[in-house]
Image (cartoon, helix red, strand yellow):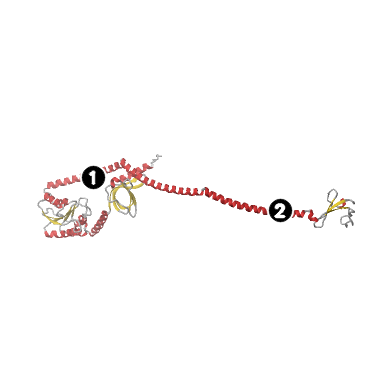
Amino acid sequence: MAERQIFQVSELAEALRGLLEDSLPRMWVQGEVSNFSRPASGHWYFTLKDGGAQIRCAMFRNANFGIRPQPKDGDQVLVRGQVTLYAARGDLQLICEHLEPAGVGALLAAFERLKKKLAAEGLFDEALKRPLPALPRHIGVITSATGAALQDIRATLARRWPLATVWLYPVPVQGAEAPPAIVRALAELPRQAPVEVVILARGGGSPEDLWAFNDEAVVRAVRACVKPVVSGIGHEVDFTLADFAADLRAPTPTAAAERVTPDIADWREHLDELGENLRAAVEDGVERRRERLAQLAARLGNLHPGRRLLERNQRLDELSERLLHAGGQLAARDEQRLSTLKQRLVAASPGQKLSALRSRLDHAQQRLLLAAQAGQQQRLYRLGSAASRLQALNPLAVLARGYALATTADGRVATEATALAPGSRLEVRLARGAVTTVVQGLAPVGAKAPPTIAKP
């Protein structure tokens, strides 16, 4: 059984980051800025989003130093950067190297819409492209009379093919007045001069500067021109819709002049061809090596301590924000605890306790008074009851009802007649007073009393 390979989390994060950065080149991304923040470190942190997704972005101080104005939430921007993994949080992150407003993107969208429309109409079909004259004697040029492009074209034509006559039709090459002037020139120049080919040219500039050559009327006029049109607009990387409609597109005004003229000798043409092939091969090899060097430099940059320091700075910014947030929570919690302790202190105050004890004492005194009164009433009732029972048992009370108590000479109560003898002395106690008598006779139980008891 093969031994399992176990990664630490940080090792896995580093592997994923390396995989992302090696497999994904630096790219352009367009979206809306949200959650923008700029801590004291000067780095920018924000989220780039559209209607379906979002990605965290970081733009460090050395990259954002010259960007003005500073972006804000809701701005549409275009950024160039490297997709990587922020290991501390395990999040995908775009490290931005350049940022610009997305207006250029809007122009590009308009460019693509019109390009699609005109292509559907067939204006760019290769079948419509016309061959250039092999040995032109009259060459028309439509460009600015004061621009560097005209000087480059004239110098190139004089060097390559001095036998040709150059016919200039000057026009503005940017701004609102440029499109109608270019349309008019494309129609009038072939009628006013015996030109065999027309060069439509302009020097380099921003996409906005070149926008006149993306005007629909200009594109249609290029296609409708009665002579072949060679476009030489901007630099090599610049493409306009006029380039697609032209019979031949040259990367620069100078190149356009070269495309419409032959060389002065076959050997130079052949040499130029070999040189072009060699230059293309060298450029291709240099480009491949430049790309490889850029990849290695990027990987080296990712391993550089400065990159790690920037990440630690980002982590420090996050921890600082968390510390400030936690400090606020602790302060609120301490304030709540202080309020609770104040309430407990007030509740434990001796004054309040004394008041409570005084209230309890008053209540106890009231209860004691009521209990004493109730006890006194109960004892009085018991005393009266006992007096009534004692009175009922009092022999004197019986005497008061007409009875008498007879006792013998030795003080014993006489209860049976049989215990007496005639002549015995008895003391008879009445309710009031007492008498002494002598027993004269005895009578059994139920018999009538003796007739006479003599007085002593």
Camera-nearest label, 2 or 1: 2
Q: Residue farthest to the left?
A: 163
222 and 233: which one is in front? 233
Query: Left or right of 361: which side holds 189?
Result: left
Q: Which residue is rendered at x = 49% and y = 48% of the image?
A: 345
The amino acid pointed to by label 2 is Leu
Q: Which residue is rendered at x = 21% and y = 45% of the image?
A: 283
Disc 1 designates what residue? 287
Comes first in the chain, label 2 or label 1: 1
CA neighbours of label 1 inside 10 A, class few (<14), some (14 to 19), many (20+): few
Per the image, label 1 sits on a secondary structure element best described as helix
Of the 4 image quadrants, the one containing the N terminus is top left
The amino acid pointed to by label 1 is Glu
Q: Quadrant of residue 22?
A: top left
Q: Position of residue 212 (x, y in %)?
A: 20, 57
427 and 242: which one is in front? 427
Q: Which residue is rendered at x = 26% and y = 42% of the image?
A: 293
Q: Which numbered marker is on residue 436? A: none
Q: Is residue 104 above or below residue 86?
A: below
Q: Pointers 2 and 1 in contact (CB under 8 A)?
A: no
Q: Position of residue 250 (x, y in %)?
A: 18, 52
Q: CA distance from mark 2 to mark 1?
A: 130 Å
Disc 2 designates what residue? 383
Q: Position of residue 140 (x, y in %)?
A: 13, 56
